[in-house]
Amino acid sequence: MDQEIYKPWRPLDDIPAELMVYALYDDCEGVRVLLADVQTGLGPPHLLINFDESEAYRNLDECRRLKTFGEAQGFPCSCSLFTVENSRWLQWFNDENLGIPFDERIEYKHYSIITQADFIDVISGFEPIVEWLR
C-alpha cells in the first residue's frame, strides 16, 4: 500500500492552527467533536465538528501514534484537521466488509483531528457539519 498522506482540511476559513479537544460525544446525534483554540483556552468559542453519519471512529493519545507521525506525509503542519489519502485504516475497514459496499454511491473518507493530546480518526461517507458555537 502507498504511504499515507495527511492533507490539511479547512472546512471553514477562520479555524486556528492549534486546537484542543473540549469534548467528544457519541450519541443519537452522531459523533461530535467539540474543539477549542489552544491560544484562548477552553472558553468559547468552540468549534463543533458533527459527523452525523459516521461508520467508525477511534481516539488515541497522540503519543501512541508515533509510527503514524514517522511514516505519514503531511507532518508537520500548522493545522489540526486533516483528510487521509491511502489510509491503512480505511483499507482495513473495507477489508472487514470483505469489499462489499454498504452503498455503492457512497465514497468513504478518513478524517483526522490531531491535537497536543488526542488523535481522533473518523470514517464517514458524508462531509461533517462544521460550525462555531459562540
Image: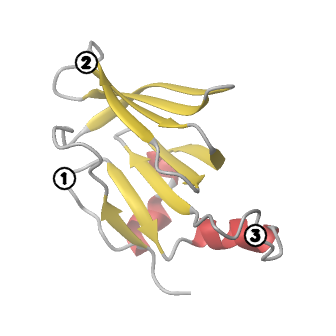
Distance CA(mark 2)–CA(mark 1): 20 Å
Q: Which mark is residue 57?
A: none
Q: Identify the amino acid type marked 1.
A: Ser
Does label 3 or label 2 sit earlier along the sequence? 2
> In screen coordinates, is 29 left or right of 115?
right
User: To which quarter of the image does residue 59 belong?
Assistant: top right
- Inspect the image, locate mark 3, and give the three-letter code of the amino acid beneath it: Pro
Q: Which residue is under mark 3?
A: 101
Question: Which-is-in-front pick, marks 3 and 2?
Answer: 3
Q: Secondary structure at mark 3?
A: loop
Looking at marks 2 and 1 on the same chain, the residue that comes earlier in the sequence is marked by 2
Q: CA distance from mark 3 to mark 2?
A: 38 Å
Q: Which amino acid, mark 2? A: Pro
Instruction: Give the vertical position of 110 relative to 46 (above or below).
Output: below
Residue pointed to by mark 1: 78
Lateral position of residue 58 relative to residue 77, left or right: right
Callouts 3 and 2 close, C-beta under 8 Å: no
Question: Contact (CB < 8 A) between labels 3 and 1?
Answer: no
Residue 132 point in image, percent of width and height: 29, 25
Instruction: Return the disc, 3 or 1, that comes first in the chain's sequence.
Output: 1
Q: Considering only vertical position in the picture, is 26 above or below 58? A: above
* Image mark for residue 45: 2
Circle 2: element type? loop
Residue drawn where x is 34% and y is 74% of the image: 73
Q: Position of residue 36 (x, y in %)?
A: 30, 26
